[in-house]
Each structure stands twice: as structure tokens, then as C-alpha cells.
Amino acid sequence: MKKLLVLVLALAVLAGMGFAQAKPVIGALIRNLDEQFVADYAANLKSLAAKAGVELKLLDSRSDQATQLDQLNTLLTQGVKYFVIVPNQTEATEQMAKAIAAKGGGAAFSNIQPSVAALKVSKNFFLASSPESVAGTIQADIIDNYFKKNPGKLAPGKTINALFLLGQLGHPAQKYRTEAVKAGLIAKGYKLNVIAEDTANWKPDEAQQKMDAWIAAYNGKFNIVITNNDGMALGAVESLLTAKYTKADAADGTILKVPVLGVDATQVALKSMSENKLYATVLQSAKGQSGTAFALALAMANGTYKPGFVADGIKPETKPGAEAPANDASVIGQCYLVPFEAVTKDNYKSYMTK
Amino acid sequence: MAANAVGALARKKGIAAFLGKNTNLVTFVVLATILGVMTRGRSFEWPSVRNLMIAESVRAFAALGVGMIIITRGIDLSIGYVVCLVASVSASFAQTPDYMAALYPGMDFPIYLPFIAGILTGGLFGFFNGVLVAYGKLPAFIATLGTMSIARGAQLIYTKAAVVGSVKDAYKVLAQGSVGPIPNLALYVVVAAAIVWFLLRHTRRGTNFYAIGGNPVAARVSGINVEKELVVVYTFAGLLYGIAGCLLSGRLGLANALTANGMELDAIAAVTVGGISQAGGVGTVGGMIIGVLTLGIINYGMTYLGVDSYYQLLVKGFIILVAVYFYIRKYSQR
Amino acid sequence: MADDRAEYVLEMLGIYKSFPGVQALDDVSLHVRPGKVHALMGENGAGKSTLMKCLFGIYREDGGEIILKGRLAKFHSAKDALEAGVSMIHQELSNVPERSVRENIWLGREPLHRFGPITFLNHGKMHRDTAALMKRLEMNIDPADRMGGLSISKQQACEIAKAVSYEASIVVMDEPSSSLTETETEHLFRIIRDLTARGVAVIYISHKMSEIFQIADDVSVMRDGKMLGTWPASELDEDKLIKLMVGRDNTQRFPTVDSEIGELRLEVRGLTSAESRSFKDVSFDLRRGEILGIGGLVGAQRTELVEAIFGLRKTSCGEILVNGKRAVIRSPRDAIRHGIGLITEDRRGSGIFPLLSVTENTAVASLGSYIRGGLLLEHRRIEAEARRFNEQLRTKTPSMWTQIQNLSGGNQQKVLVSRWLMTLPEILIMDEPTRGIDVGAKFEIYTIMAELARNGKSIIMVSSEMHELLGMSHRVMVLCAGRHTGTLEGPEASQENVMRLATQFE
């Protein structure tokens, strides 16, 4: 026991010595590494930091806003001033911004947009994101295209009979993606008829179970399956394949009787697309968002940030748009919108890694 | 044999005997020292201590509640989602009236209402747990598993799965403010711990809790109304979760479906590390608080040192197992 | 019997109580005089404890009246009974081991400080009152000690002190002396006499005949849930009482053990425990058809020895030979493979699975022999075999699927014997085979043992009951403080010789 203690203390001293360099430090507060997008985001941050010779303090809050606040306090105590943040909730961004501003620092928020109030805390806070709702909007665009090409698939009266597989209820990505795709379809003049919707907690196996039950209950009554992520989309695809809910040809882009849509453009999803199973997905660029956010944080740390700064090839917005916070003229210069991309039959190959 | 060992313990003098009886304190001091060395003293500085206090306060309330329940040989798995529901309810009554997405738009409730609503919600769920366990004779594990799901459903229905944000500053300051350098949250914990300490140590009710956990049959034949006491302990714990939820929504300025998820496991782990035996009948308030601080210092230390989050879970698990192992050994020795 | 009504402090009139499938109390009446010791006698399962639990508010009687000091009493819980002046020493220890002696004594009625609506514990008074109580009862127990740290007999003393401290007018004592030494029992009797001198009525339940005639004024006898009557103790003697309890003459207490002793079956050579203060260098052997008794005082390490042979405890040296071949026994599995079975002394603690059925309790040690295709249990065969063994032993049970907890102690013990017979052992170790079993069932267990020996089984019986030890064993081996002090056979095997060997090291 005593020996063990001595050993631990000795290791502790050695480890303590490791902190002696004076590199610029950037804090990264990451929502939850279990999410594919966030994991990709964090991985890209690490490689960018290594390239730039910056010490990156990356912390994972495991979806808990209280933990993220604690982590922020800890890093501020350690003297870290500039941050890249993937927040848990929009509503929490103002409080974090205030705490950072109190120490004279700044931050770029990705993935979940900061509130207008957060960006108003000081000119050193930025949006570097493609808001979740855009993923839903792009899903709506893809669906619109599909039914324009295959009007026979619509139910009478331009009606879409949809099944929705949702992520963990209350999760921002679940909420915003779902709301946006519904709003988008209605805006395009469709009559949206939700046959059934339920959470599958982002999980393929839960999605498959739900889908099994729905195929039994609503056989022939739905003409599309919309999901909040690729994992659940693939679960639904499996279920449809097992139930032989298929047709002979893939003229409309899928061998399934109804198209299935996901979000994320994971490699498995792309492979499924190449096999004419999954119909389409949406790419939220983890690389683009992390690159932009990191460029902003680094510029602040180096003191080279000036209004109008071009971050990783993205320019700040100049005109207020439709969505918060990029709808407020007073903070528009702090908003960097990273584009989304629809991943369909036409372009999916370019996203596949070899 | 057992009597000999106790005798030997009694013969040991001073510090050695004290430490032998308080392995939870030893664990805490050892971990704090290791962290102190690794951060070259920074973790002993006031800002760090303050951060630790803020971070662990809400969990401390949950731990005090479930600690008492475990003393009566029970368990409570509903904590996380009850706190989540309470945070949502309290936040909904504290939203600024001009907030478009408020649950009660345009309503400006008095500042005490969120607290009353939140604490009552917590107490109600605790009471429900207590009735199920005491009169329904359901195993506590199953009863609270059920209420956990009910609380989660209620939260999602109440909030329609949305974030309950834009909480008034006057409400937030109660949780975020300080008295001098001391954060308000820490003061609340001190008051709550003192009340629980008094209850357990100096009232008949507290003695009854220990008796029920130590030997339910003995408690019954000694004329204790076991059912009533169980309802009281679960309700009291529920009130503490209520306070925890209110403070959490004040601290975050919001609540959503993910708030406080998994808090039951943190709280149970903390009190177990603090020496509250799952077998019931044993444990002190000091132990509960030390347990919370021990887990807190592990969290804080690893965050401070920037340990990868996946490794944090691993290390935390190991430390919990080692700490509990030493405690169990202490018991089996006597 | 019944003289003047006012003479009684307690009357229980026509009490009925039934449990699923059992009429536990059938029109039972009991009349208790103040200042007297009233012994309540009967075999296990006769309904004594049930009657007392009705009195104490733990059970609700289905019918009948309880009249306490001339007034109708309705108790819904122990609290009601305690407040009405009835206290009870329970058969099982019912303390809170992790709390102090003083907290245990005053549990549920702790002395309080009062400040308006706020009350809190008066630790000082609690301590002083406990110390005074212990002094009055001449018990040398520190009120601050942790209950669980005390010896079993001191814990029992605390139970007695607690029951006395209620200052009740009726004190029920259910087997209070089961874990007391003779001196301690004497002390208990002094306390009882002191209580009765102050007008307290004591209801005393015990299986120890000698105690009854030493302390009781009145004796009530129950059998099969019915009250046979009440007699002054002076009108009864031991044989009469036993006859009343079992309903037959008790001339022959042991069956004849006429088995044929055969070849060597078990040899134990120099067996020494891995624990320092346990048995050392014990050697003995056991033959086919033989019953070997192991006697000794408490602390002689008899149980430890047989548990070591069964692989439950570690040994540091020595060897065990089964049928002439060296047997390595590190666990009960090994022992069972070598044809050894053990019926433990603590039936409730380490014997029965209370919630499982008779069938399951019987089959649990031999399930391995009833598996088809390496996977599936052959339920039908298991039930048939379990039934066969229990029928052989005449286990009385409503069905093979009755939970074993609903059987009487004697029948539970028969199920345990069946369990081990089903493993087809050659050697059966029985640790205190008749502890807590009533007289009638004891005789049946003895008969079973004799039959087993006649069929060629070898039996080791650990027993603290001298009559049983001498009456049932071919040879008696005596241990004292972990050492084998001698083995007695034939006419040598007398009470005096056993006692001499059992105390040889003291």
C-alpha cells in the first residue's frame, strides 16, 4: 500500500513537469464525443492544433450542460482565454460567453448556434456553424426533388405519408432537424401526413424494432421514411429489407418501395447508398465547422483577429438572414455560416473515403 | 473473535484509530494530495476550491437524499429524472415574461413560485416512491425504476421536449451568486447537511432510519411504524431532490431533457465511497459529503489535467471500486 | 383451573388464526396470573409462537378476544402492545447490530429534549438510564458498545434487559435461554423472580424441560394448534409433560441402532485447521454402517472440523482417505463427488431455501445428475426422485410444491436429509440434526438415522445433546478446544466420561 502510494506520487510529480511549455492554449468544450459529428469535429481540431503548434485542451461534457460549465470554470481558472465550443444548448451560450468575457477572452460556437445575446456579450464571440435546422431543410429539398421526379409515389392531393424516426427526445439535433424538415415540406406546398413518429434514441437497433412494428401496422400506407441520423436510417433500411418491402428495379434510386433519408453522411451510410438501399443523406461538415471555429480562436489567441477576418475560407455574413443569430444586424459580422450539402445519388461518391 | 477485534480497535490510540475508522477520509486526502502535486499546488488555490464547491453542490443534495434512503436499506434510481423534471418545472415558472418560447408566455410569476413548485414536485415524487416501497411492498429498486420513467415522461410532456430557457436573472442569482468569496450553492449545502446531520444524529426519526436499515424486524417489534418512516425518508429525500433541481435550473439558467441525467448513479456512487453501506443501517452525513467531494475531486482533477473523457470514466470507475473495497474490508474484519 | 376472573392479568379467549392451508390456532384460550411464571409448552409447530405473535400485535387473530387487565384489547402493531404493557423477548435475536446497546434498548421510545414543537434525542439520559438498568439487572455491559460486537449471549442479555425496561405488566419470553450458558440462565431466573416479585406476569416458552420445573408456576400445553389445558407445575413431571406434548408415551426415546459395521470408509489423519485457534491434529476413522458421534462443549471446534471435511474450511495439514484412497477436498463439490453430504447446524441460515418448494429444496444438491443432453433438467424425474426420498422419510407436506418455509422444523430437516440422500452419499455428516425440532420429530429423525446405517451408510453426528449422543452413536469421539481428547465405545460411553474428556484441557 505504501509503495503504491510512493509510486503514484512519483508519477504525479513527473506528470506535473509536463506542463512547462509556453504555447498558445485553446480550450475546446465538446458536447459529447459519442456523436459521430462531434467526434469528427474533435478529431479535426486535434490535427489542426498539432499543425499550428497550439496546445489544445479538449474536454467532453457527455451531454451535460452543468458539466460543461464546470469544465469552462476549470479552464478559466487555469488561465485559458480562447475557446472553441460545441454547446449543449443555445440557451446556455450567453452564460458561458459572460464567464469568458469576464476574463477578457473569446470563443467560437459550432454545431448548435449561440444566442444573439451571447454574440452581443462582446465582439470576440462567433457563430461558426451550420445550424441543425438546415439539415432538416435540406432533407425537405431532397424529398421535394424525389417527388418531382416520381410524382406517382405521392398520395392523392400532393400528400406525403411519412414515418419519422427521431433521435433522443429533447436533443437539439432531434428537435431542430425534425421541425425544419416538416416546415420545409409544408412550405413547398405538400400536405404532410405523419403516419407515425417515435424516438429510436439515435440507435439502429431501436429504429429497426420500431420499423418492424410499423411495417406490420401501416403496410402500404406510407411513402417515405425520414430519420434524424444515418444510424436510425440504416436500421429502418434493414427492417424494410427483412420485410421484403422491396421492388425489382432501382429506377428511382432505391430498391426499397419507399425512400429512406438520414443525416450525417457516415461512411456506412454512403456504402448503403452505393448499394441502392439508403436513398439520401445530408452532410453537416464537421471539418468545415471545426476549421472555421479553430481559425477564429487561433486568430484571437495570436491577436491577429480583425473584423472581416476570413476564417478557413469562410467570410462573415454581411446581410441578416432568416435564422438566429445571423438575423440580427448588430452581430452579423460575427456569424460564419459553414455550408451544408445534400448527399444524393449524384455526388455521394466524392464523400467516400477509399 | 469479533469482540476482540473491536477491543483491539478501541485500544489503538489517536490518529491511527481515527483513520482506521475513516477510510473514506483517507481516500479523499490521498486523492487531494495527488492532485495537489500534479497541479503543482494550483488545485489548493481558492479559485479551484471554489470551482469544486460549485460543481458538486447540486450533487450533494442528491447524495444527502439518497444517503438517507440507503441507510434505511433502500435505493432510489429516480433521482436523475426527478431532478430533471424539477429543474424544468422550476425554470418554466422563472422564465422572463417577454420570452417568446416561454411555457407560460407573458406571465411574470413571483420569484418564490419556481421554488415552491419545484420542491413540491420533488417531494411528491419522493412521497410516491415511499408509498410504493412502504405500503406497496415493491422492492425499492423496481419502484424507483418505475418512477424514474414516469418522471422522464412527465418532463418530456411538460416541456414538449424543448429547452426551458431564458430564466430571469433574479432567479439565477440565487444559485449563481456569492456571499463574499463563498458561492451561495455551497452555503445551501452546509445548511442542508446540518439539518440532515441533526435529523440522523439527534432525533428519534433518524434513529428509526438506522434501525429500519439495520434490522427491519427489530424495528417493527420495537414499536416503530416502519411504513410511515419509509414514506417520510423517501419524501424528505424527494424534497432534497426538489431543492437540487431548483438550484440546477438557476445555475444553468435553463433545463431540458438531458439535465441531470445519470445523477442517481453519481449520487449513489458518492455515498457508497463515503461509507454508506448498501446493506443499510450504517453511514453518516460526514461520510456522504466526503464521498461527494471525493468523486468531485476525481472529476475536477481529471478535467484540470485534461484527461481524455473516455479515460476519465475508466479511472473514476477504478477509484470507486478501490475505495469501496477498502471500506468493505474494514467491515468484514470486525 | 379457572378460579376468579379478576385473578388474571391476561386472558386470551377462543383465539383462531389460520394461514394458507394451516389452522395454526384453533379455539385457543390462555389465562395468565399476575406475579407468576406461566410456561407455554408444546412441540414446534404447536402454535405457541403464533399465539404470542397474536398477543403482541404482529399477527391479527381471525377470531377470539384478548382481555388485558379486565379490558378488551385490540393490538394492530407491536407499538400498541408495548404501550398497553406487554413486552416480548423474541425467539430470534432482533437487535440492530450496527447501533449501540443504549440505542437498541430505547429504540422507538428514546428519551427526548423538547423545545416547543422541536424534539431531539437526549443522548445523556439514554446512556444513564441504560447504565442504571444494567446495574439493576447486574449485567456487565457498556451502554456505548456496538451491539454487533457483543457475544451472542450478551446480545441475548440485552434483549432481556430491553424487555424488562418496558416496565410491562406482562413479559413474554420466547426461548430466552437458547444461547445462554447455565450460569447465565441462572442469572435470567433471578431476573424473572425479581419481576414476578413485583407482580409482573412472565410467559415463558422453552424446550428445556429442566428449566420449566425450575421456574414455572403454571404450565399450559399446546398440541397441533389446540390448547390442551393448564396445570400447576407441581402437578406435572417430565414424563407427563412429554406425554401431553407429543400425545403418546415417551418410554422409548431412541430406536435401536442395529446396523452391521463393515469396512473402513473414511480415515482422517492429523487434520489441522488453517486458522490458528481452531482444531489441530485430529485423527479418526469411520466404518460402513457406523454412526460416529462427536461431542464437546461450545468452542470445541466440532462444527469447524466437519465443515473442513466437507471442504467448507481450509486446512493446513493432514489428509482424508475415502475408501482407502487419498481424497483432495477443497470445496463442497469435491466432497459431494467423494460421496460425502453435510447437513449444517443452522437450518434456517445455511440449510433451506425458504421460498423454494420441497422438490427444489430436495433436488438442489444433485441437479447435475438429472440433466439430459448436457443442458436440460429432467423435471419429471427430479420430482419423482425428490418425492421418493421424502416419502421414505415420511416428510409431511401438503404437496411437493409447497414452499419449505411453510413446513415445521422437523419436516424441514427431513427435506434436508432427503436432499443429501438424493446425492447418493456414502457418508452423511449431520451437525446438530435435531436442534430446534420437537420431541416427536426427533424420534423420527433418529429412526431415519438408524435405517440409513442399517442400509450401509456411514454417519457422523455432531451433537450437544448428551442423551442423543449416547443414545444414537456406536462410538463417541470427544473434542476439547480443537483437540481430539478421546473416543468412547460401549459401556465406557457414559455422561461422566464424555464430560471428563470434553473438559480435559480446562
Image: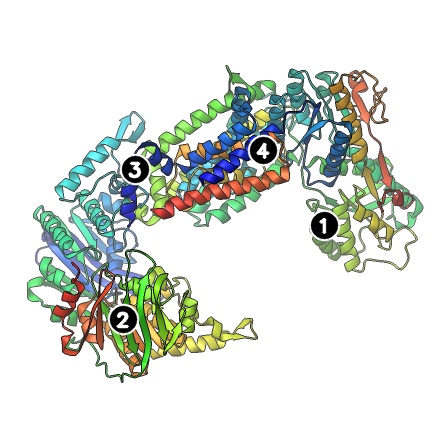
**Residue tagged 1:** A204
Considering the numbered disc 2 on the image, is that residue within a helix, a strand or a loop?
strand
Chain at numbered mark 4: B
Q: Secondary structure at mark 1?
A: helix
Q: CA distance from mark 2 to mark 4?
A: 61 Å
Q: Where is A339 relative to C268, above or below? A: above
- Left/right placement of residue C444 relative to residue B60 reads left
Q: Quadrant of residue C318?
A: bottom left
Q: Residue at x 87, y 48 (%)?
A: A154
Instruction: Tell me if I can see residue C396 in this picture.
Output: no
Q: Which residue is mark 4?
A: B302
Identify which amino acid the numbered label 4 is placed on: Met
Residue of label 3 = B12
Report helix, strand or loop for mark 4.
Answer: helix
- The Cα–Cα distance between marks 2 and 3, rounded to whole angstroms, is 43 Å
Instruction: Name which quarter of the figure residue B288 lies in.
Output: top left
Residue type at mark 1?
Answer: Pro
Badge 3 element: loop
Can you give x and y, in whole percent of width and height, for residue B44 in the image? Answer: 51, 23
| B200 displayed left or right of C184 | right
Return the chain for callout 1: A
Quadrant (top left/top right/bottom left/bottom right) for the C terminus of chain C: bottom left
Mark 3 and mark 4 in contact? Answer it, CB < 8 Å.
no
Dot label at residue C102: none
User: Can residue B26 be seen in the rendering of this structure?
Assistant: yes
Cα distance between the residues tagged 1 and 3: 60 Å
Q: Nearer the viewer, mark 2 or mark 4?
A: 4
Residue A255, percent from left and from top: 86, 55
Drawn side of residue B27 relative to residue A46, left or right: left
Residue in the foreground of this view, choosing between A137 and A55: A55
- The residue singled out by tag 2 in the image is C461
